[in-house]
Image (cartoon, rainbow, N blue to C red):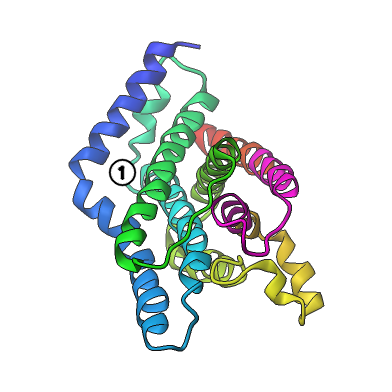
Amino acid sequence: MNWKTFLALLARDGHVARRNFIPLVLQTFLQPMMFVFIFGRVMVSSGYMPAVYKSLLLPGIMAISMVFTGVWAVAMPLIAEFQFTHEIEDRLLAPIEISWLAIEKVVFGTAQSVVAGLAVIPAAWVLLRPGVELNLHSPLSFIIVTLLVALFSACGGLALGCTVNQTHIGLMFSMVLTPMIFFGCTYYPWSALDHFPILQKVVLVNPLVYASEGLRGTLVPQFPHLSVVAVLVALLLFDGLLLVLGLRQFRRKAVS
C-alpha cells in the first residue's frame, strides 16, 4: 500500500474538517449538551431525577455523541461524493487500492468520534457540577472500549453511506439512528429493562447498547452494567461485520 497517498488523503480530510470547524462542533455537541442540560441539570435541580442520575447519564451522552459524530463524518461525505459532487471519482484515481480509500474514511471518522466522545466529559462536567462521580478504575479498559465504540460508529457510517440513497437520508436518521438511541441504554442501564424481559433481549441486537454499557462500566462502574468482557466481544463482532459490509458496498458503488 502507498502510505504517502493514504496519509495525504487523511491530511486532506483534516484540512476540510478544520475549515468547517464551527459547523462541525455545533452538529457534534449541540444535541448531546441539550440532553445533558435538560435531563442532568433541569430535571435533577427540579427534584424529578435523583442527583446520582448525573453520573449515570454521562456515559450514555458520550456514546450518543460518538456514534452521531462517526456516522455523520463518514456517511454524509460518502453520500455527497457518490451522488452529488462525484468527488470520489478523483480519489479513485489515486495510486492506492480501492478498499484503502474506504479504510481512510473509517480511520478519519474514528478519530473524529474519539475526539467528540472525550470532549463530552469536560463539557458535561461543567454543566452538571457538582455531583458527577467518575470512577476510572481501569484506564486501559476505558481506552479500548472508547476506540471500539468509535470504530463501530465509523464502520456504521461507511455501511450507511454506501447503502442509503440521497432521497432517504432523513429516513436513515428517523428509522435507524433515532430508534438506536432510545433503545440503546443511553439514558438508563440495561438492567432497567428487567420488567420488560422480551424487550431486554431484543435490544441486544442494538450495538449502541454495548457502547453505552461499556462506557458506563468503565467510567461509572458503581451503576449496574453489562460485563465489560461481553461488551468487548460484542463490539468486536459489530465492528468486523459493519466493516466487511461497508467495504463490500463501497467497492460495489466505486466500480459501478
The answer to whether residue 230 is magenta is: yes
| Residue 59 in sight | yes
Which region shows up in magenta?
A: 211-240
Q: State the residue at coordinates (66%, 37%).
A: 244
Q: State the residue at coordinates (34%, 48%).
A: 84
| Residue 172 in sight | no
Q: Is residue 221 left or right of residue 18?
A: right
Q: Which residue is mark 1?
A: 85
Q: State the residue at coordinates (51%, 58%).
A: 59
Query: Residue 126 is drawn in which quadrant?
Result: bottom left
The residue nearer to you, when weighing 184 against 160, is 184
The residue nearer to you, when weighing 43 against 47, is 47
Tell me the element at label 1. Answer: loop
Query: Residue 33 is drawn in which quadrant?
Result: bottom left
Query: Badge 1: few (under 14), some or many (20 or more) residues near its Cα, within 10 Å?
Result: few
Name the chief secondary structure element in magenta: helix
User: Disc 1 residue type?
Assistant: Thr
Q: Report x, y in % for residue 204.
A: 73, 62
